[in-house]
Image: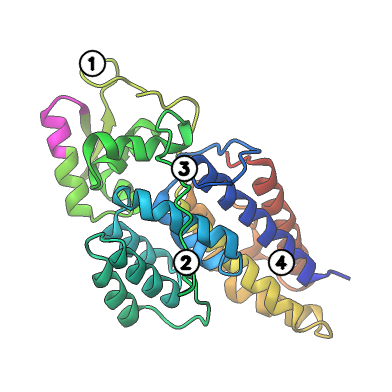
Amino acid sequence: MVEWNEQAGRLREAVLDLLWEQWGAFGAAGLSLAKKVPFVADPEALILATMRFGAGEARLTDEVLDWLSRNGGLISLQRLKNLQTSSRVGTREGLVGLGSFMEQQGFRNGKALSIWAGKVSSESGQPWVSETSELREMSVVPDLRREECFLLRMRSVFGVSARPEVLTWLLTHEEGYAAEIARDTGWFSKSVQAILNDLELAGLVISHPEGKRKVFALRRRNGILDPTLGLGDLHWLSQGPFYLGVLYAIQTADRLAKMPEASESAKAIAIRGEMTSLNAAFRLSGMKDPFAGGGFLKGTELVECFERGLRDLVKVLEGRDFG
């Protein structure tokens, strides 16, 4: 008999370990770096995932707030809102608390974030920022030479805007459409298209028509922009959809844990209600879908597919194998 509580717990623990690793790479105080993060860490997606999966981890929350108090200027609150709109990984309480915290620390648009979150996000019952939190002021400025910090490095060069994400996406892909880049980076299509046009005018990217659309690619070895900018062997993972997929998986496992006496058919019905969303989230993330094929199964086969997918997802997180 499957222990769904145990399965969900293992997944929570695995994703929390990944969050700790990324904040440690960013320079949050006291966080270990036991494993290398094999993708370009996304600061806004990381914040949303931390308030969702780390709401009960007081130490992690305190260190993240400490880091934000020093490095909040590297964060785009507009992009945070964009990712929340598309992924819904964050929580209303978390976003309202974060906005108030950023306002207290003197960062612009903090109050606007709180107001926005209160209007558009549903209640979750999970506060994130505690009113009693005290900053230790021990976080450091990120070491921008670290591969995990590549996006922060690009922001330090080009500013906190859509341009760093667009360039990073181009550096980690062979080519792509403007709409595809906008979806993966969390920026508006018009902004991304304007940036691509500017980069093409400057000779940094090239394009060619494909049907009714244009495909853009970085112009390699053009003497203007180094083809890697020290990127190393990291790759792009669309982390908003990824964390949303993890959230769907945990919520489904939790739901199954509350129906231990249910038949396999009843469990399959509970799983089927989330399977389309699960498949879509992991497909959009760019990684191999651990639940692939589940949408075509029924009954016991679907339950077994979901259990197998949970185990595979934990293995991906523990092994840092997102290829």
Q: Is residue 214 magenta?
A: no
Q: Does the segment drawn in magenta span residue 200? A: yes
Q: Nearer the viewer, mark 4 or mark 3?
A: 3
**Label 1, on which residue?**
222
Q: Marks 1/3: CA distance? A: 31 Å
The location of residue 239, given as percent across then percent down, is: 47, 52
> Which of the two marks, 1 or 3, is nearer to us in this view?
3
Mark 1 touches mark 4? (CB < 8 Å): no
Q: Please state which of residues 220 and 267 is positioned toward the viewer in this rendering.
A: 220
* Residue 101: quarter of image: bottom left
Give the residue type at disc 4: Ala
**Real-space Cα separation, disc 4 to disc 3, in angstroms:** 27 Å
Circle 3 residues within 10 Å: few <14, some 14–19, many ≥20: many
Tell which circle, 1 or 3, labels the residue nearer the N-terminal end. 3
User: Which image quarter holds the C terminus?
Assistant: top right
- Report the amino acid beneath label 3: Phe
Classify mark 4: helix, strand or loop.
helix
Q: Amino acid at mark 2?
A: Val
Q: Position of residue 293 (x, y in %)?
A: 64, 58
What residue would you read off at disc 2? 89
Q: Which residues are magenta?
A: 197-205
Quadrant in the picture for the N terminus: bottom right
Q: What residue did someone put label 4 on? A: 8
